[in-house]
Amino acid sequence: MVIGDIMKIDLNGKTVLVTGAAGFIGSYLVKRLLAEYSTCVVVGLDNLNDYYEVSLKEWRLEQIEKLGGQWTFIKGDIADKAFVEELFGQYQFDVVVNLAAQAGVRYSIQNPDAYIQANIIGFYNILEACRHSYDGVAKGVQHLVYASSSSVYGNQQKVPYSIEDNVDNPVSLYAATKKSNELLAHAYAKLYGIPCTGLRFFTVYGPAGRPDMAYFGFTNKLRRGEKIQIFNYGNCKRDFTYIDDIVEGVVRVMQKPPVSGLGVSGKCEVPYALYNIGNSQPENLLDFVDILLQELVRAGVLPEDYDFEAHKELVAAQPGDVAQTFADASALERDFCFKPHTSLRDGLRKFAEWYKEYYKI
């Protein structure tokens, strides 16, 4: 953590790039920026790949369009270096939020190439574009905020997970690429003075989320009358974090880039920071499923007499799975006076209500 004065960025009047803008977190962030900062120019970038249904991504973009504001969407891939360079040259971004990535732990086992392209090469292209934004008389990117993941903690036994913990033993390729992002960002912050902040997100959920996430996938299967598989025989805990809490944290971080200064050791620190964003309240997976079922019944997505026991199967853990996630978010609270607070029931209730409306049940 950098110690020293923190420069405040007023997002009004700034040009902001949000990669992964058609994604879950990206679309929520764009809507928040357009709603709160009327003179902020927001450029959204997404390749609209088919990892999950493109129609949901298009729906998210439609919701953004309804807000109006200074918003431009561009379809493109951050793995295309020439394209990224051209984009940065055209818009001269003040703040960059890199949320574009190939997500999913299990998918990385069967499709590693997608993760190397998006999470390694793509992120490298973003870093290089930020680096060259300072060339000549250009003002340069004032802050690069990028998504990391709680997956970097692997299966360590110490809880809660702190940003000071050793994370050198990833249990999935996805986690390894996110750890690599943190190392690359630190190197670029040190070598080129790019203010960089990484955010380790903990199990983000909510309306219009990713269909590959447990709560969404379970809902789809239960509606079709299929069995859901609960891994590790239900002996899992996850630190579920509601989407609005994630976005609140991102917006606060965007406005306060880390700066070089003297650390406690008296050595010069680099403009680099790292934070956990998590609810800090791990929930047992079986309890989570029980609450989800209650809220789906309440919203009318499932009938009141739904036989859940007949649609539940307890199975062994899968490769890449971790037993628990638990965020120590004290650094975020200390530096930004914010702590995620949405309860799991409130968050799943909003998801269930959205699901009913979106699928016209």
Image: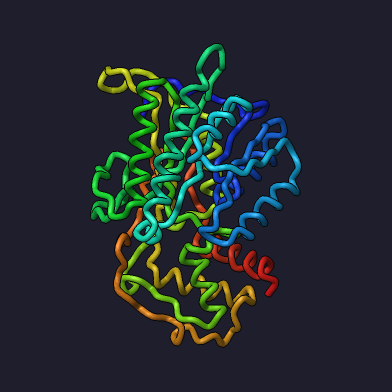
Q: Which one is nearer the viewer's eye here, 151 or 330?
A: 151
Q: Is residue 332 above or below residue 95?
A: below
Quadrant of residue 304 within the rendered picture:
bottom right
Q: Quadrant of the N terminus?
A: top left
Q: Does residue 28 appear in the picture of this structure?
A: no
Instruction: Please tell me which residue is depicted at 33% across the width and 35% down the height of the picture.
Output: 183
Q: Position of residue 243 (x, y in %)?
A: 54, 52
Residue 17 position within the rendered picture, expressed as x and y whole percent measured from the top left: 58, 35
Q: Is residue 10 visible?
A: yes
In this orientation, which residue lies closer to the viewer: 266 or 57?
A: 57
Q: Position of residue 121 (x, y in %)?
A: 42, 39
272 w.r.t. 154: above or below: above
* Residue located 49% across and 22% down the image: 132
Residue under the point 70% across and 71% down: 360
Locate residue 229: give its quadrant: bottom left
**Quadrant in the picture for the C terminus:** bottom right
